[in-house]
């Protein structure tokens, strides 16, 4: 299973890139494909899909958070990868999460291909599940460094899996980002320090 592709962009299409990684050219569907430059190096977090009609397809995103949001959106019945990509093309991850939490059909309907029924389906299906992205978005926005943001995102996922609340996760990610240089620490050390902070606060 392909989870990440790193390489140089050798071609751009309306909604896809061709990325040369290790001498192999991968066709990867991405949001905002026209914003990429041929010859530039890129790292894409990938979601793999297979359909009987089109065969295997790769969908790439600049962050794990954006990829996971795409996977969540396309988990809705009747919402395929093309529509999931369109949502992330026209709206930011923050706007999508906010719209679902607020049951804001109008914002979702502003995306081509999303009618009122599909917007209501997305809201109804994901209103509870989308809550886990709130502290992760806050953590992602709290640090300008890509590496640090990725660490904070993964930290939020780990703490959520351990049963901590959104408030506790937000508190821990903010504190650890303020106190430590996350680019120099292995993830298990960051997680251990966060757990110690949370234990001390209880």
Image (cartoon, helix red, strand yellow):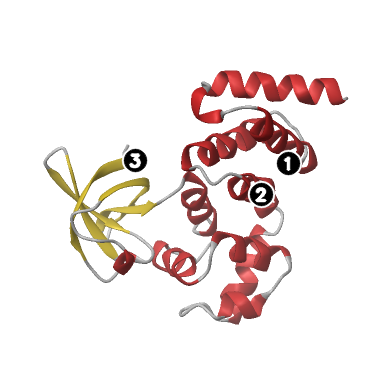
- Mark 2, other Cα within 10 Å: few <14 / some 14–19 / many ≥20: some
Q: Secondary structure at mark 3?
A: strand
Write down the residue under mark 1: 170
Q: Of marks 1 and 3, which one's residue comes earlier in the chain?
A: 3
**Which label is found at residue 4?**
3
Q: Is residue 141 left or right of residue 170?
A: left
Which residue sits at x=70%, y=28%? 162
Q: CA distance from mark 1 to mark 3?
A: 27 Å
Which of the two residues, 202 or 127, is positioned nearer the viewer here?
202
Q: Contact, CB < 8 Å: mark 1 with mark 3?
A: no
Q: Is residue 25 left or right of residue 36?
A: left
Which residue sits at x=53%, y=59%? 73
Q: Secondary structure at mark 2?
A: helix
Name the front one of labels 3 and 2.
Answer: 2
Q: Of marks 2 and 1, which one's residue comes earlier in the chain?
A: 2
Image quadrant containing the C terminus:
top right
Write down the residue under mark 2: 138
Image quadrant containing the N terminus:
top left
């Amino acid at each position: 299973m392909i989870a990440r592709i790193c390489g140089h962009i050798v071609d751009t299409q309306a909604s896809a890139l061709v990325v040369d990684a290790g001498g192999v050219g991968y066709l990867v569907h991405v949001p905002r494909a026209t914003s990429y430059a041929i010859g530039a190096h890129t790292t894409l977090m990938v979601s793999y899909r297979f359909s009987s009609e089109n065969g295997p397809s790769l969908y790439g995103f600049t962050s794990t958070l954006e990829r996971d949001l795409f996977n969540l959106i396309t988990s809705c019945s009747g919402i395929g990868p093309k529509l999931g990509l369109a949502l992330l093309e026209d709206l930011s991850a923050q706007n999508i999460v906010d719209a679902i939490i607020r049951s804001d059909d109008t914002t979702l309907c502003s995306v081509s291909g999303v009618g009122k029924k599909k917007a209501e389906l997305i809201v109804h299906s994901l209103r509870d599940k989308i809550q886990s992205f709130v502290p992760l978005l806050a953590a992602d926005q709290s640090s300008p460094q890509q590496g640090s943001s990725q660490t904070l995102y993964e930290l939020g996922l780990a703490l959520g899996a351990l049963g901590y609340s959104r408030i506790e996760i937000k508190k821990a990610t903010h504190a650890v980002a303020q106190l430590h240089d996350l680019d120099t620490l292995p993830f298990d050390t960051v997680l251990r320090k966060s757990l110690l902070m949370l234990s001390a606060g209880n």
